[in-house]
Amino acid sequence: MAGVVLGLLGMTVGAAPPSAAAAVPPVRAASVEKTVAGGVAGVRVPELEWKACADVPKLQCATAEVPLDYTRPRGQTVTLALARIPAGDQARRLGALVVNRGGPGYSAVDYLNGVIAGAVPSPVSADVLARYDIVGVDPRGSGRSTPAVQCLEDAEEAEALARGVSNAPLTAEERRKRAQADTRYASLCRKRSGTLLDHLSSVAIARDLDVVRAALGEERLNYLGQSYGTYLGMVYANMFTSRTGRLVFDSVLDPTRRDAGAPGTTKSARTGSDVATMQTLKEFFRLCEEGGDRCGFGDGNPEAAFERIMSVLRKGPVPLKASDGTTVPLTYSFVVTWTGNWLYQPMFWNIQGGGAPFLKAVDEAIKDPSGAAGAALAAEVVALQQVGIGETPYTSPLTNAYHGVTCGEVDVPKNAEALARLAAERDRHAGPFGTLRAYEDSSCVPWRSANELRHKGPWNARTSEPVLILSNTFDPATPLWSAQRVHGMLPNSRLLINKGWGHVAAQQSTCVVEATSRYLLDGTPPAKGAICQPDTVPFTTAATTSRPGSAFNS
């Protein structure tokens, strides 16, 4: 969501150099797990005072104080921001369903507001909305929770840091600028966020989730996680197995490959998200070719046309002459970044400003950068940038919280030179997305934090209710094979595959939403081997003139 604000909402934890945080031992005694919120003796269960959200009156908001450091449960606290859509039929209410949108760092308030406004598809049916309170929690360090991770003072400072910095650096000079900016960014995060950065682990967030469960008065956690939210759900399920209720994991991260693997690798290389992005692009090419005039890009060979575009842009930016006489540079980084983004949502594959219409405009503008085609694309690029599309590395609203969590627990190459070598090697497997995805976590290379215990397993919890795992066949962020591996890890789980494209299966298929809702309402999972079909197949209808809006990144 390009409009999500992840600024600092309260006081920061005092700045200090990184120091080792004592690891919290896992809860082993069943009697302790059943009685102690967060799995740590001494943690207070907060009382939630729900009231209409100040800026979103259709939602109810509350706050919950939890320990900053679970080794000091009565010490300093952080304040979590909660939002809920109350069950429509309180007389038949089943309980609370906690949702995590992913990121890490998406604001629950913004997500639930998007759901009730219709800007973001609901992951559940009207019947579920009637029977459950839908509760979102802004994880520690993010969204409206306080303190939030702060790295840059304002948009101007972010833009200054990002100026001339590529999302997908190709040359030695581009890589040097990126490494220099990453180092500056990581240093500012430490300076302005202080010891908060040492307490943003997924283990701590899972403990927070359990404290929220207790505060909601729920004996078991009913939970729907998407993307990173599935990783958090796996951590919770394996830490607090006896407290799990009905769990839904949509678009799954393989926990064994997210955090660690072969030395010197990135998360994208270990999980294969770079390869998955390229596979999804190849599906775009196939469907575009089959769509003929309904696609309109590439004159029957969209893959060759795309490679032609990339070949030109690899040599340097193409200066587009705007209608007002100014120059708008069309860069390799912008085209690759935006392509990697719109692949997330097939609804944007044939919409003005996205997918085939965008690539067709790029192809035409490269041939006529100073003419009408160049001016048209210049206006398109500026319009896309104004809604946060194709953002540079430090200007995304999720950047601070994402890196605060990710960089504290995900292994990366030891230095910028090693990252550059890995990115070049991944390009041989994943085309332009090898470098793009590798550099998503480049700020983690110079990052310094003493994060709390990283959950290294086990990952094979046997939950009392089956875990429902959802995946699209072609997902550019969380590939199907990750969902299949997690299904193999969890002995009581069921995998439902949507034979479609994009990220977050519930956004692509009513069949998935219905199956999810049926499971949440009566505990019945889909039959083994069940398959869903997508609501739409790209290029079966003509392109539309709507533009991607601020909800695109949802």
Image: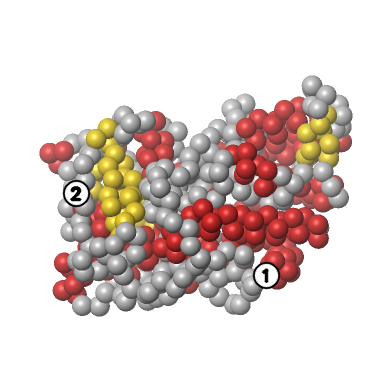
Amino acid type indicated by mark 1: Asn
Does 81 sit left or right of 477 as displayed? left
Mark 2 falls on what kind of element? loop
Q: Which residue is drawn at 65% across and 42% down?
A: 159
Identify the mark at residue 415; answer none if there is no mark: 1
Which residue is pictured at 64% across the width and 34% down the height?
Answer: 384
Going from N to C along the chain, the mark reached first, 2 or 1, is 2
Residue at the extreme left of the image, as rendered: 91
The answer to whether any part of residue 313 appears in the image is: yes
Name the residue at 34% across, 54% down.
78
Nearest the viewer among 281 and 259 is: 259
Q: Where is residue 315 in the image (x, y as percent from the top left)?
A: 86, 50
Q: Which residue in the rendered view is the most extreme toward the top?
A: 324
Q: Which amino acid does label 2 sit on?
A: Glu
Q: Name the residue under label 2.
A: 47
Q: In this view, does 97 lie above or below 249?
A: above
Instruction: Point out residue 152 in the picture as x, y percentages from the top left corner.
Output: 57, 47
Q: Which of 99 and 540 is in front in this view?
A: 99
Residue 385 placement: quadrant:
top right
Question: Residue 541: x, y in percent?
Answer: 60, 33
Label 1: which secondary element: loop
In this rendering, the count of numbered labels is 2
Sort mark 1 into few (<14), some (14-19) or many (20+) by Cα contacts within 10 Å. Answer: some
In the foreground, 472 or 164:
164
Taking the spot 73% from the left edge, 39% from the top edge, the residue there is 359
Q: In which quarter of the image is residue 110?
A: top left
Neighbourhood count class around disc 2 (C-alpha, 10 Å): few under 14, some 14–19, many 20 upward: some
**Whether residue 169 can be seen here:** no
Res 264 label: none
Q: Where residue 11 sits in the image (x, y, percent)? A: 40, 47
State whether residue 167 is above or below residue 449.
Answer: above
Instruction: Kindly indicate whether the residue at mark 1 contacts the one at mark 2 (C-beta within 8 angstroms).
Output: no
